[in-house]
Amino acid sequence: MDLHVFFRSEVKPTLGCTEPGAVAYAAATAARRLLEPVTGIHLEISVAIYKNGRSVGIPGTNGLRGLTLACVLGALGGNPDKGLMALDGLSPDIVEQGQGFIDAGKITEEVVQGMPSMWARVTLTGGAHTASCTVAGKHDHVARLEADGEILVDQPPAQAAGGTDWTDELMAMDFSRLWDLAVGIDDAIAEQMLEGARMNMAILDHPGSTEIGIGIGSTLSKYNEGGSLQDKIKEVAGAASDLRMSGGDVAVMSSAGSGNHGIVAVIPVTMTARALGSDDRTLAEALALSHLVCGYIKAYTGRLTPTCGCAVAAGAGAAAGIVRLHNGTPRQAELAAITLVGTLLGMICDGAKESCGLKVSSAASEAWVAAMLALENRGIRNTQGIISPDIHELGRTLREFNEKIFSAADSVMIGLMTRQNRAAEGRA
């Protein structure tokens, strides 16, 4: 596996929640091909995209939220060259125009049943012209681009940039291979890992980062004075997610297409490294392992899932990375990842919003616990319920768990969200 290609694709900066980010990117990409100013938008999204983008804050909008807003802003002022940071640097005038566009009923939204979880299509009209962009498979992969009936890009997810889909490669690896890849990274990848650490820790330097959202950072810091490393990890990771989900105008380094995955994969490992006094090379290897394990689990479960990937996938990665910092063994790192999954397997994903900070903080904290257990050769060492002590078998279990046991969860949640919307409109 080409690690440079893997890390460039799977570990990259993103601004705000990645589902609205993907929609904004698609809209901005289509707008670049539209020959007239945008006068109408039709947004089509999968069930999973709708669920994940319905309630989350949009960066740079003073607390406004939702997929339609992200789509309109992407079309009116987004920069497709910035990928998942397409909304970076929007002016207040564009935000005001975008809200007016929505209030005038110029955008329609459609949830399309039966589509892959990571799928969205934005169709723009302007005068007699049209442009349409579909992202699929990955948040920033343009699968199809059309303008005035001409197909400009036709590249299904299986033909992603570079022709690389490492799902099969990852699923074929045993854990020791993931470990070897991580400890063998070159200097360029190591620097990328360290840049991710700097970026995700710097989110807390953002003004008001401990006050925004539901208050995880400010509340826990009030009671964590002199607290344990586990307590501080819980506080910092929760505060970082709080800021992102509330629409904080700050970028983070993502993992497997998710900023919150990136927070869980990076912050517990980085904070542990600081506490241990680890050198940069050891931290970089631990972060590489964290991202690889997260990607390994996502290879089995898919990009967007009914279960919380921040917990199950990124949490497992962080647990393994912490073991590496403590000079543990590959088997202990595998044991830590498995124990973390056994802890948080049933955590549901009910979309992106401020309360994701509670799940993120729990996953980050439990990653540290799972690592400590593994370093004592404790944790889940034999089959426990549906959890296997072998990560390959665990991956297969997670895939079936998502596809069969939780297969109807997203549709049910969409129904519940629709009912809540109607109830809210009735109270307005």
Image (cartoon, rainbow, N blue to C red):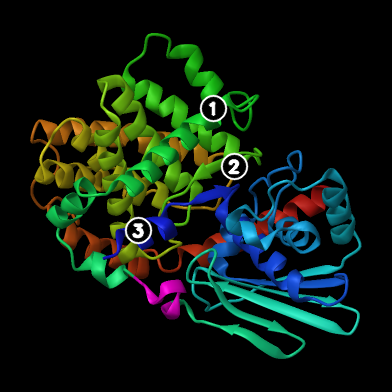
The secondary element bearing badge 2 is classed as helix
Residue that sits furthest to the front in the current view: 187
Residue 106, quarter of the rendered image: bottom right
Q: Residue at x 27, y 52 (%)?
A: 293
Q: Which residue is mark 2?
A: 245
C-alpha span from label 2 to label 1: 14 Å
Rendering coords of residue 81 (x, y %): 64, 61
Nearer to us of marks 3 and 2 is 3
Labels 3 & 1 near each other (Cβ < 8 A) = no
233 sits to left or right of 110: left
Nearer to us of marks 2 and 1 is 1
Q: Which residue is mark 1?
A: 204
Label 2 crowd (10 A; few <14 / some 14-19 / many >=20): many
**Is 293 situated above or below 340?**
below
**Is 387 situated above or below 46?**
above
**Is 200 situated above or below 154?**
above
The secondary element bearing badge 3 is classed as helix
Q: Amino acid at mark 3?
A: His
